[in-house]
Image (tube, rainbow, N blue to C red):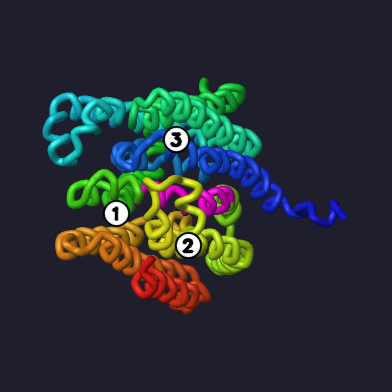
Amino acid sequence: MLNKLKPKSEFAKNVLTLMTGTTIAQAIPIAISPILTRLYTPEDFGVFALFMAITSIFGSIANGRYELAIMLPRKDEDAINIMALGFIINVVLSLFLLFVVIIFHDNIVNLLNNKEISPWLYLVPVSVFLMGLFNLLNYFNNRKKFYKDLAKANIYKSIGMAIVQLSLGFLKVGAFGLISGQIFSQIISNTKLFLNIKRLNLLSKIKKLKMIALGKRYKKFLLIDTFVALIYIIYNRTIIVFLQKFYNSSVVGQYFFAEKLVQIPLSFIRISISNVFFEKISKLSKEDIYNEANQLSIKIFKLSFIPFFLIIFLSSYYVPFIFGNEWSILHKYIIIVSLSAYITFLISPYSYVLKIIEKQEVSFLLHLIKLLFFLFYFIVFKELFIMEFLFFFIFIDSIISLFFLNIQIYFLINRFKITFIHIIWILLSSFIYWYIFMLGD
């Protein structure tokens, strides 16, 4: 009986390995969340959210996106040189950010409209460097199929973060406890993954001329995908900055925490699948990539929809009890955020398509359109009530995501196609609107 339940394919085994480690890693933040909401206020989480938004924007491009090219060469010698090139770019960018923070510190604080972020701006370059380093190490370990070690790194990262955030939380040090936990966890995970690469004895293979040659070979990642990633992360994270600018830290904290609670149960599956799926489809034909991505999307939906639906739409009952009265309206943020999160989750198998077929310029244009919409929306509708503002923003955001899906499908099979995901979007968005604005509380 047990043998029948065991995954038979290598792909399924690798996904299960990563998913097991990631599940444990993600379960830890969820488990301590009720404690954290009693140790830290929504305003503390607002400062932490602002810090994470800034570091995520720069961390996503810290390596010039060369981490994505680590998977592509046949030789490990080439891969380690690509990694070294990404590391150099990471160091240069981090030092540049430190210079900017020192020179323009007061201007940045005024621009963000949050004085509490002031002392923590000096830690932004440190966190950006560690984030960039993790991306390099993660992809190289993924290339070598060190899935167990990737799983362990995620677990160690969560444990380290939990210990620091809880310990400092009891000391009532505010956002410092949350930020310190983040940085400490990055150091732990990077150390674990770096030791794997050190044992491969590949560091001696790093050569200047090799780095330059490979940098030119995969220059699209630097020249195009860097801007694609930057636009994408600005679009996704700058909402935190805008909410701080036009609303307040409490709103930012509620939104950030809701996003975190929704993303955690979805991302542990998405990231585990994507890491292995990217390695699998990178060698397939376009038609086969489409078939594999479509089948995987359907499987994800079948496995996730009922538990997702129950967890999200029962949130009004369990949120006040679990997280405390100070977070009583958190369930509304959770429900609104869930629409975009779930659609993104369902289309995640398609996320690497344009990179694999080397159509980064198309991805750049699509994300530029998305960013322009974002700026237009915030300028025109910033006076709306916060719930209306967020719902219509995320509603339109999910429409754009579905448009992107169709573009990716077109490049694979030369035609547009309506998928089951479009139907799910119509049903889910209609229900959320009815729940939030028709039922009220």
- Disc assigned to residue 235: 1
- Disc assigned to residue 254: none
Dot 2 or dot 1, earlier in sequence:
1
Question: Are the two marked residues, 2 and 1, in contact with CB atoms closer than 8 angstroms?
Answer: no
Compared with residue 172, is residue 49 higher up or lower down, i.e. above or below? below
Task: Tell how many labels.
Answer: 3
> In the image, what residue type sits under mark 1?
Tyr
Q: Which residue is mark 2?
A: 342
- Residue 70 highlighted magenta (yes or no): no
Whole-number angstrom distance, CA of label 3 to CA of label 2: 34 Å
Dot 3 or dot 2, earlier in sequence:
3
Residue range highlighted in magenta:
255-272
Query: Percent x, y for residue 240?
Result: 28, 48
Q: Which residue is mark 3?
A: 82
Q: Secondary structure at mark 1?
A: helix
Residue at the (24%, 33%) spot, across then down: 117
Please indicate whether residue 82 sits to the left or right of residue 115 in the image: right
Instruction: Classify 10 Å Cα crowding around label 1: few (below 14), some (14-19), many (20 and above).
Output: many
**Residue 288 shows up from this direction:** no
